[in-house]
Amino acid sequence: MALTAEDIVNKQFKPKPRLSEGYDADDVDDFLDEIVKEFRAVKAENDDLKQKLVGAQGRIAELQRAADAGVAPTPTASAAAADQNDSATSSQLLQLARKLHDQHVQEGLDERERIIEEGKAQAQRILAEAELRQRNEINELDQQRIGIERKIDELKQFEKEYRSHLKQYLETQLNDLNTSGQESAKNF
């Protein structure tokens, strides 16, 4: 089955879950749009050449039938030479048409390979950039995690010291209260 521009346009990809590796959907869509544009241009050119080839082959077949049927008058040597010249021209035209067709088909194949190679190179570049971005983000998150863990440890130490100071303060206040209570009881 031949690939058509509509196949490319209508191709659906399953979206990847967030926070996983993959390609940016907009970049993929843009690149596919470029491929479709090039694909359509090559296909239109190929169709045009095929039509020209069919026309040339029809004209050659018509000239050959006329020559085989003896329809062309050949009363003089110059007329016979003209028929041979038309036949030779038709043969040359057919060869030229075939050569042009083959050349354009090869150019289309070469262009397709070039586009595919560019796509692969761009995909590798995008993937490398994404991996670098991911490593950088992971490093940044690790640094943030370390900072948060350090802050948690500081807060735990602060809480421990605060509780200790508060306990000492309350015990001092209780002792002072007991002492003042005992002195008040003695005075009564």
Image (cartoon, rainbow, N blue to C red):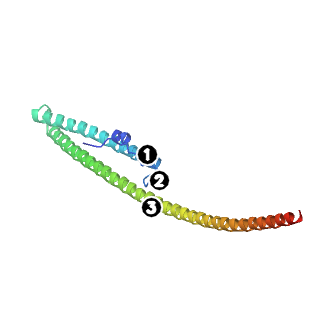
* 91 relative to 22 in the view: left or right: left
* 11 relative to 50 in the view: left or right: right
Residue under label 1 = 29
Q: Residue furthest left?
A: 69
Q: Quadrant of residue 4?
A: top left
Instruction: State the image coordinates of residue 143 (x, y, percent, origin top left).
Output: 57, 65
Gap between marks 3 and 1 measured at Cα: 19 Å
Residue under label 3 = 128
At label 3, counting other C-alpha atoms closer than 10 Å, the crowd grade (few under 14, some 14-19, many 20 or more) is few
Q: Residue furthest right?
A: 187
Instruction: State the image coordinates of residue 27 (x, y, percent, origin top left).
Output: 46, 49
Gap between marks 1 and 2 measured at Cα: 20 Å
Going by the numbered disc 2, the residue's amino acid type is Leu
* 101 relative to 181 in the view: left or right: left
- Name the residue located 26 percent from the left edge and 43 percent from the top edge: 2
Residue under label 2 = 19
- Name the residue located 84 percent from the left edge and 65 percent from the top edge: 180
* Mark nearer the viewer, 3 or 2: 2
* Mark nearer the viewer, 1 or 2: 2
Which tag, 1 or 2, sits closer to the chain's start?
2
Residue 175, numbered circle: none
Determine whether label 3 and label 2 are within 8 Å by CB: no
Instruction: State the image coordinates of residue 124 (x, y, percent, origin top left).
Output: 41, 59
- 2 and 109: which is toward the camera: 2
Determine whether label 1 and label 2 are within 8 Å by CB: no
Which tag, 3 or 1, sits closer to the chain's start?
1
Q: Which element is circle 1 on?
A: helix
